[in-house]
Amino acid sequence: MDSLITAAAHALAAGDPLGALKRVALRDDAPALALRGIAMAQLGDLDRAKALLRRAARRFSPREIVARARCVVAEAEIALASRDLGWAEKRLEAARDILEAHGDRANAAHARYLSVRRLLLIGQLSDAERLLATLDPGTMTLPLRTVHELVVAGIALRRLQANAARAALTRASEAAGQARIPALTAEVESAWRLLDAPAARLISAGEERVLRLSDVETVLSSSALVIDGCRHVVRRGRTVVSLATRPVLFALARTLGEASPGSVDRETLVARAFGSRFVDESHRARLRVEVGRLRSALKPVAEVRATKTGFVLTARRAAVVVVLAPPVDDAHAAVLAFLTDGEAWSSSALALALGTSQRSVQRALDGLAGAGKVQSFGRGRARRWLTSPVPGFATPLLLPAAVPGD
């Protein structure tokens, strides 16, 4: 490897893409194309970066399997940055095996971190934790150590473990400060803002206040009956009743919880649960059926009783009833949660991350676009959606993850 290639590689490792381009911008050999691709990725031109890396991979000879594997890893990193979550994971695993077999442990570890970050992004926390456990941050370079702690913090955020997230971000800040790479420092600072931003609203006895993530953790660990409007579960301590697939029952539970210990009249319940402005005998009959189902579902933790005008929800053993609501109430809050990371998403990537159909996601995006909350560019497969982050609000409670305590 010649001196210019070596110097460009060192510049990229130090987070200086312009310095790297000064050395290889006019060269067209395979190593230079690969470095130019990585430099363009660091500068944010992901389409150009992907094209350069593919050209480089074609120009490396079949015997240069390590160089080809590094190109695969770089392409996977670009796919993650551009939210192309449907990349060939087996191809990345094969590249990682080649790098490990040839002693390139740093790039092999980097490939493994890309897999972990993808799992984290689509909410597969247990799989992400298992893969993360195979990596030892003590043997990593400072940039990889920073990435490791950011992933640990991300998992803790999704699991609503504020103290664990804060400890991981402290370690990430130390590693990023020693690495002196601006992009890494900015990513750590962004994670700190997320941790300290309002994460939910607490509604109790008709009053409402904003909570940070640490406050949410305290509420979930208390003796209160929590109706979680972010994850659509009702829980008290270790007892969790999921209503995620029963939207009518959850709408009734949330409406009753917001008014508890008071009662809610039947007209209000019909409007909130069924979306009907007028109440006739058929609505009353359906309400009785759905309330019966809700009473049965919540039997381990709460009681639903009829009153003269409606119904009332009370927790067993005289516990307080509280409602956790998303920081922003929107029918498509989960889609907005992903888009507020500032990256451009495809509808297929959003569907994969949310575990739903692409058609459902497209309907949500069309509704958000009609309300002026998101915008798109490109056409067909190249169409991407983005929005500006909601100022001052964190979104980990809106993203898919295991129910806390599982």
Image: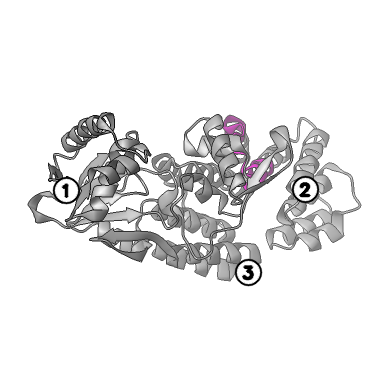
Q: How many marks?
A: 3
Q: Position of residue 265 (x, y in %)?
A: 22, 47
Residue 271 vertical placement versus 223 (above, below): above
Residue 223: percent from left, percent from top: 17, 57
Residue kind at label 1, given as amino acid type: Val
Asked whether 340 or 62 is in front, the reply is: 340
Ranked by sequence position, the earlier of labels 2 and 1 is: 2
Range shown magenta: 73-94
Q: Is residue 78 inside the magenta stretch?
A: yes
Residue named by callout 3: 180
Q: Quadrant of the C terminus?
A: top left
Q: Which mark is residue 279?
A: none
**Local SS, label 2:** helix
Task: Name the mark on residue 312.
Answer: 1
> Which residue: 26% across, 44% down?
253
Q: Is residue 157 above or below residue 70?
A: below
Q: Which type of secondary structure does the marked residue at label 1 adopt? A: strand
Q: Does residue 339 appear to the left or right of 169 in the view shown?
A: right
Name the residue beneath numbered marker 2: 37
**Residue 330 at what x, y percent from top left?**
46, 49
Magenta-colored stretch includes residue 165: no
